[in-house]
Amino acid sequence: MEKADIKSFNISELQDFIEEMGEKKFRAKQIYEWLHIKLVTDFDDMTNISKDLKSKLKERCYITALEPAEVLTSKIDGTQKYLFRLRDGNVIESVLMKYKFGNSVCISTQVGCRMGCRFCASTLGGLERCLSTSEMLDEIYRIQSITGQRVSNVVLMGTGEPMDNYDNVIKLVKMLTDENGLHISGRNITISSCGLVENIMRLADEGLQITLALSLHASDDDTRKELMPIANKYTISQILDACRYYFEKTGRRVTFEYSLASGINDTADKADKLAKLLKGMHAHVNLIPINPIKERDYKQSDKSSITSFKDRLEKHGINVTIRREMGRDINGACGQLRKSYLETSENL
């Protein structure tokens, strides 16, 4: 009999599961608290559960617990990058960023990625598989357990396309915001997407009060096709229509991520086009100095170009910030640490 992934059960599913085992329903809440608040990784640590029930759980279930394979700490800003090993031997990255408002964790949603964005190290090896809800949860739980500090913000911007792992991601959000678990505010959860239109529309209809961050990175379709293969399937116009729908349904302002590559998408005319596209959309633009990777030729825009691009957008009335670079000295960009780890492992 294949064992059940108990950490992926929401409270309702766990109650049903426990009752099917012939146990009383209230036991589910006790177990759920051990898994999602006290963050235990062994049934034997559940001190208010009988030996008989523990034996049943061991026989029928497993507890997902990620194993830290490597932890790097930035000497610049204290950012920590974690490389976690999964049950099947795959590895994924997660990042802990410390801000004045609290601790933010950036998690991966897939092992690898099939979106193929030219400037991203995550896509270089393609997609291995999607992460389960429990694996995504445990990225957060392990970091909390290791540091002893609460995570207040969660960002789904690590390796993978969240909207390509839709069902597991939606379940993750609902479990994170559930009062029976960590009970993180939906407003403190951000989901990034390169623009899978149908699933952005589905997300809008979920009724979740989260932030959508759209990875745009270009203000015209030709430039976007050069940077992002997904642009061959969806036009910017289609993506922006989906973002407008998201705002209409949720009232939540969409953030547009825009990575600046020197000479590619950072010119004055590109800024003007972007401002025209986003006019009247209640948009926020997050400019990102691109993190160069050795496999690609893209270079980071210089500071004057970044500032000029920002100023030009602001003159058009667009709300803009420049993302603070975090963990640059520890392979801070998505996929870099995982890739270097896999390369080293192959050479051993």
Image (spheres, rainbow, N blue to C red):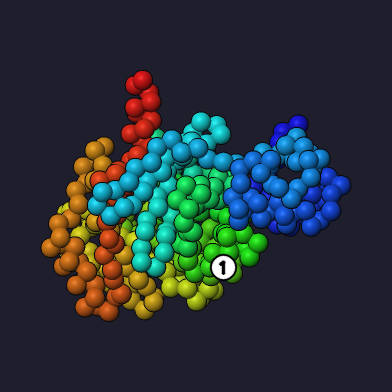
Residue 96 in the figure: left or right of residue 130: left
Residue 319 in the figure: left or right of residue 176: left
State the residue in front, 36 or 52: 52
State the residue in front, 294 or 86: 86
The image shows residue 132 at horizontal and vertical percentages of 58, 45
The image shows residue 212 at horizontal and vertical percentages of 45, 64
Q: Is residue 316 above or below residue 26?
A: below
- Residue on which disc 1 sits: 208
Q: What residue type is labelled 1?
A: Leu
Residue extending farthest left = 304
Badge 1 crowding class, 10 Å Cα cut-off, few under 14, some 14 to 19, many 20 or more, is some
The image shows residue 113 at horizontal and vertical percentages of 44, 42
State the residue in front, 303 or 308: 303
Residue at 41%, 43% (x, y): give it.
82
Q: Is residue 16 visible?
A: yes
Residue at 68%, 50% (x, y): give it.
9
Residue at 37%, 59% (x, y): give it.
98
Where on the picture, by quarter, is residue 5?
Answer: top right
Residue extending farthest front = 47
Residue at 53%, 67% (x, y): give it.
186
The N terminus - image quarter = top right
State the residue in front, 168 or 151: 151
